[in-house]
């Protein structure tokens, strides 16, 4: 069946039904998109409104909390009127800066001690719910909004507990609350946003009279949530309603429905007109072209089938119709010529690919254009292969030379490590002997140190004995002096006795015969006196000699004591030096042991290095074999200059 008949029977109804379906679907999708865009706009406006309300609530609660935490003790303020006046002045400035109706500090009985409004100082707030909530244990309390007794505008009071369990509250006027935080008509003129109190009465509304008139209520809206439709006067709105978590207020944000309805109507009319015009144009063009191109399409399809089979010669197509198609100047002729150019390019690429496959990398590949991916890829592949093969050949030679040098260096390293190993073994043996000798020296020094300590003890004992001997010699010298004195007395007594005996002899001679016996006695007494005098003189001489020798001995003993003292001092110094020598010997022993251990470690490393050098030499030989094989494989390719 011809394409024209198929088109009339099948394609035409499908096109008409498709255009109608597309129109309906487009209309429905556009309507849904308009609704979704409107919902997104409403939700965005509502989110902005809730965010503003949350920020406002957080700012004011933090404001009340901060004031309460920094409030002074009421009991102290009562004792200082000047401080109370100063606090009221500060609260006045604070209320002015933050647009507060009132700010006051209350005592335990609810009496205002200080206030931003001086007329409120001393007022009784004990019956106010925001005071009683704090006294019952709450740290922070937000009272429900109420109308001001002064101007009838809504007020919001926030109270907080101070550090001294007093109460501080701030009153916020809500008269400009709508314009500051709720009204977004400057951004969206079709928007309507307002806030209802928990009892469904207007709290912030563009119509300020509704706020004062409690008869206007929105009970029907309070019962709903989420996306809603409602009517404000004669104007219908679509919006979003949600209860704000912190305040419990009901936040409503919406947009007028009339712009949405008008946009949908315009969209429907536009889609219908476009669909009708499109159907007429499409049908006319298709009917005119189908007869003209159907025959040529068959020829092109046949050519493409041959190309799909890999037949770039197009053997299944007659040459005459194909040449006529190539001579056409319309799109069909352009398609045929483009297909012919594709065939030519493919032949050229196939030729270059064959050369590359045969190892000939000297061909000049010229891509048809900058988007000829196959030509660019073949050219890049040829260039990369030229570079890779050249680099491989060069690197293979370098690797071969490096492998030979590395093998030579490995052999040198192996020989060097063997020599080092033997040297380390000799050094280790010598260190073992040194360590043994140091150990013997350490033992000898320890023994010598022990003997020097013992000799020092003996010398100290000798010094003590010499001091005792010197003291004894001094005592003997004193005794000799006393004996010499006694002998002098004896000599004097003998002299007097001799003199008395001489007088007695004279008296006996005078007595004559009667004094003969007495003369004999006197002679004997004189003889005894002479003998006593001689004996006393000899004893005195002997005692003087003894005293002289004792003096000499005492002097010698003092010299010996001094000598012993110097010997003891020298022995002390010798003992200290021996102690230092013993300590140094122990350190030398430890150092020798550590050095010996280090030599063992070096010996292990050298053996490991020698083994690694041997393995490196073996790997170098394997690398040389691989390099030779790689050079043989690269010799197959013919590279460009």
Image: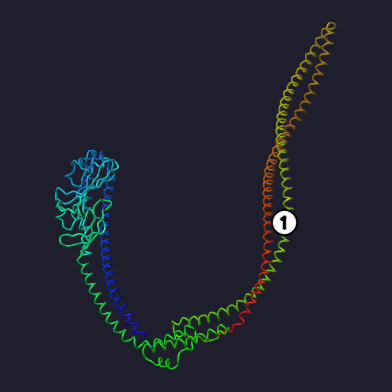
Residue 308 visible: yes
In the rendered structure, the answer to whether residue 289 lies left or right of residue 515 reads: left
In the rendered structure, the answer to whether residue 270 lies left or right of residue 300 reads: left
* Residue farthest toward the top in the current orientation of the protein: 514
Q: How is the image coloured?
A: rainbow
Q: Mark 1 highlights which residue?
A: 428
**Mark 1 Cα-neighbour bin, 10 Å: few <14, some 14–19, many ≥20:** some
How many numbered circles does the render carry?
1
The quadrant in which residue 31 appears is bottom left
Along the viewing direction, whichever of 135 and 167 lies nearer the viewer: 135
Residue 180 percent across, percent down from the top left: 22, 58
Quadrant assignment for the C terminus: bottom right
Residue 97 visible: no
| Residue 425 vertical position relative to residue 389 in the rendered view, above or below | above
In the rendered structure, the answer to whether residue 405 lies left or right of residue 330 reads: right
Quadrant assignment for the N terminus: bottom left
Residue 267 percent across, percent down from the top left: 24, 72
Mark 1: which secondary structure?
Answer: helix
The quadrant in which residue 319 appears is bottom left
Along the viewing direction, whichever of 370 and 331 lies nearer the viewer: 331
Residue 423 percent across, percent down from the top left: 72, 61
| Residue 129 vertical position relative to residue 420 in the rendered view, above or below | above
Along the viewing direction, whichever of 46 and 238 lies nearer the viewer: 238
Residue 357 percent across, percent down from the top left: 56, 82
Residue appearing at x 77%, y 25% in the figure = 543
| Residue 112 vertical position relative to residue 195 in the rendered view, above or below | above
């Amino acid at each position: 069946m011809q394409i024209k008949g198929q088109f009339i029977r099948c394609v035409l109804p499908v096109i008409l039904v498709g255009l109608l379906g597309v129109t309906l679907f487009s209309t429905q999708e556009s309507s849904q998109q308009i609704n979704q865009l409107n919902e997104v706009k409403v939700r965005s406006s509502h989110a902005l409104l809730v965010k503003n309300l949350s920020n406002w609530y957080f700012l004011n609660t933090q404001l009340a909390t901060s004031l309460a935490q920094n409030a002074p003790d009421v009991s102290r303020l009562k004792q200082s009127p000047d401080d109370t006046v100063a606090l009221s002045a500060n609260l006045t400035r604070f209320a002015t800066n933050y647009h507060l109706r009132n700010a006051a500090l209350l005592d335990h009985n609810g009496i205002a001690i200080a206030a931003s409004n001086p007329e409120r100082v001393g007022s009784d707030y004990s019956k106010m719910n925001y005071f009683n909530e704090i006294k019952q244990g709450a740290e922070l309390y937000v009272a429900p909004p109420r109308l001001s007794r002064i101007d009838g505008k809504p007020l919001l009071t926030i109270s907080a507990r101070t550090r001294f369990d007093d109460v501080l509250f701030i009153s916020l006027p809500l008269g400009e609350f709508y314009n500051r935080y709720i009204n977004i008509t400057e951004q969206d003129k079709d928007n309507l946003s307002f806030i209802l109190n928990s009892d469904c009465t207007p709290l912030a509304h563009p119509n300020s009279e509704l706020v004062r008139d409690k008869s206007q209520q929105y009970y029907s809206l309070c019962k709903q949530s989420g996306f809603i439709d409602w009517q404000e006067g004669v104007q219908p709105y679509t919006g979003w309603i949600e209860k704000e978590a912190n305040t419990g207020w009901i936040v409503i944000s919406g947009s007028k429905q009339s712009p949405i309805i008008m946009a949908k109507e315009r969209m429907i009319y536009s889609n219908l007109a476009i669909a009708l015009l499109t159907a007429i144009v499409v049908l006319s063009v298709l009917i005119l072209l189908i007869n003209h191109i159907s025959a040529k399409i068959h020829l092109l399809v046949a050519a493409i089938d041959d190309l799909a089979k890999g037949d770039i010669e197009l053997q299944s197509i007659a040459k005459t119709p194909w040449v006529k198609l190539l001579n056409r100047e319309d799109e069909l002729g352009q398609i045929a010529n483009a297909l012919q150019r594709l065939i030519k390019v493919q032949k050229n690429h196939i030729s270059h690919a064959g050369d590359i496959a045969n190892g000939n990398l000297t061909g000049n590949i010229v891509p048809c254009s900058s988007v000829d991916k196959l030509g660019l890829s073949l050219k890049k592949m040829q260039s990369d292969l030229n570079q890779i093969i050249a680099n491989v050949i060069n690197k293979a030679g370098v690797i071969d030379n490096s492998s030979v040098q590395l093998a030579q260096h490995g052999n040198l390293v192996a020989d060097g490590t063997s020599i080092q190993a033997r040297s380390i073994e000799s050094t280790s043996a010598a260190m073992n002997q040194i360590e043994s000798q140091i150990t013997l020296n350490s033992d000898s020094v320890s023994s010598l140190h022990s003997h020097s300590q013992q000799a020092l003890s003996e010398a100290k004992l000798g010094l003590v004995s010499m001091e005792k001997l010197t003291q004894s010699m001094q005592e003997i010298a004193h005794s000799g002096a006393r004996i010499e004195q006694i002998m002098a007395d004896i000599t004097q007594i003998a002299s007097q006795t001799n003199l008395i005996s001489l007088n007695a002899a004279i008296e006996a001679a005078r007595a004559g015969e009667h004094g003969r016996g007495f003369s004999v006695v006197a002679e004997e007494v004189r003889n005894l006196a002479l003998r006593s005098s001689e004996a006393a003189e000899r004893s005195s001489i002997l005692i003087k000699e003894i005293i002289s020798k004792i003096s000499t001995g005492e002097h010698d003993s003092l010299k010996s004591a001094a000598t012993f003292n110097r010997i003891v001092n020298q022995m002390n110094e010798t003992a200290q030096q021996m102690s230092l020598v013993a300590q140094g010997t122990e350190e030398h022993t430890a150092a020798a042991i550590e050095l010996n251990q280090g030599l063992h470690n070096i010996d292990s490393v050298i053996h490991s290095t020698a083994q690694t050098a041997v393995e490196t030499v073996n790997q170098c030989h394997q690398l040389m074999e691989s390099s030779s094989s790689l050079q043989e494989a690269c010799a197959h390719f013919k590279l460009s200059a």
